[in-house]
Image (spheres, helix red, strand yellow):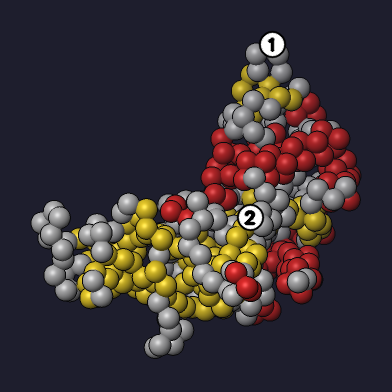
Amino acid sequence: MARRWNGTDGCLQSASGPAGREHRSWGHPWVGLLLKVVVAHGAAGAPPEPGDAALRIVRPVERAVVQRHVRAEGAVPVEVSAALPAAGAIEARVALAADAPWHSLTREGETFSGLLTAPAGGWHRLEVRSVVDGVVMGMATVEKVGVGEVFVVAGQSNSANHGEERLAPATDRVVCLDPEGVWRVAADPQPGASGDGGSFLPALGDRLEAEFNVPIGLVACGIGATSVREWLPEGSRFPAPPTLTARVRTAAGGGFESDGAAFAMLVGRMRQLEPTGFRGVLWHQGESDANQQDPSRTLPGPLYEAMLGRVIRATRADLGREVSWFVARATYHVPGDESSTDIRVAQAAVCRDGLALPGPDTDALKGPLRDSGGRGVHFSGAGQRRHAEAWFAAIAPWLEARLSTP
């Protein structure tokens, strides 16, 4: 059936043709941006000989996971750049069976594009072929394409690779996306985040994969020691700088402002997942705004609430659609400095006001769940696993309710 985007959570809506007859449509105005296959042939203008056309599939790449739009299925974007004669066509299919149907992609010059409906789960095999005057000239495949759940993870060090133990998922259906667009099994350290240690992402991916029986895609964007001030869009002003100032600058007329680098990176990583999008953002940050040694660098709770709200709204405005955010309560430093009521109230307020959903309370993860024998701010291996369980407990009921909604 034809699909159109409803603008929320990367979901698709069905459409029917005349007299209720369902049809497939590949002619969406943005579809030409989706998948590229290059077809090489002989002399310019000469039709290719059978078998001499080499296809290179650029998107989807191996192990790519696309966000499903309902429990049972999703849409795999396909884009093909092909130097074919006027009579040539590119066809694609998700090869669920030997007799799976082929679908012609829409042509715009040398670009062929479309969306292939595929069942949630996988891995699935994607096949692409070039056809000229009814003759198959070449074929290419992507062996593993998944339709499942995709999450973006952002914040500071405990959202990144600063844990004590490098973890690896138990299944190859838990994957991560790097900044260059390559998907791989999500073993620590996670590409695109700071640090070179461990994270909670592999353990969380395993729990989600086991619970929902679909591939899980993770996009890590965390930057260690960052204040929420550093995540604001470029030019956003504030009266006092954070403790570390690499991503802020003095503002004209006084005060300080964000240079926008972290925000631009975050939105850029989100855009890697278009047009099918992702399920939500997992935000774990607050430690670098709470209880700073220089009190002038501590961020008052009301300002934290306003700034995090601005980050969330700005990502939605930039993407042009709603994006679900989960916000953890995270202010713990070391034993004796275990929480900031001011920042915790602000984090809870963002959720209470409906701007975000409540994530886990990770200030409660103490003692041997922290690194350096319980003396550190980062999580031990046991803490990383407990951190993952806490995120799963926050996400899973909400996700099940989303999937159960028509």
As drawn, the residue found furthest toward the front would be: 19
Amino acid bearing label 1: Gly
Location of residue 122 in the rendering, given as x and y in whole percent from the top left corner: 52, 79
Question: Which label sits on residue 41?
Answer: none
Residue at the farthest left position: 43
Within 10 Å of disc 1 (Cα), the crowding (few <14, some 14-19, many 20+) is: few
Q: Is residue 13 left or right of residue 81?
A: right
Label 1 sits on a secondary structure element that is: loop
Identify which residue is drawn at 64% across, 45% down.
Answer: 320
Query: In the picture, residue 237 is in which quadrant?
Result: top right
**Residue type at mark 2?**
Val
Query: What is the residue that sits farthest to the bottom in this orientation?
Result: 98
Q: Is residue 51 above or below residue 264?
A: below
- The CA span between labels 1 and 2 is 35 Å
- Circle 2 residues within 10 Å: few <14, some 14–19, many ≥20: many
Q: Which residue is mark 2?
A: 153
Residue at image coords 74%, 37%: 310
Rendered residue at 68%/45% (across/down):
316
Q: Is residue 178 visible?
A: no
Q: Pointer 1: what residue?
A: 253
- In the figure, 162 relative to 383: above or below? above
Q: Is residue 314 visible?
A: yes
In the image, taking residue 245 as reference, residue 331 lies left or right, namely right
Q: Secondary structure at mark 2?
A: strand
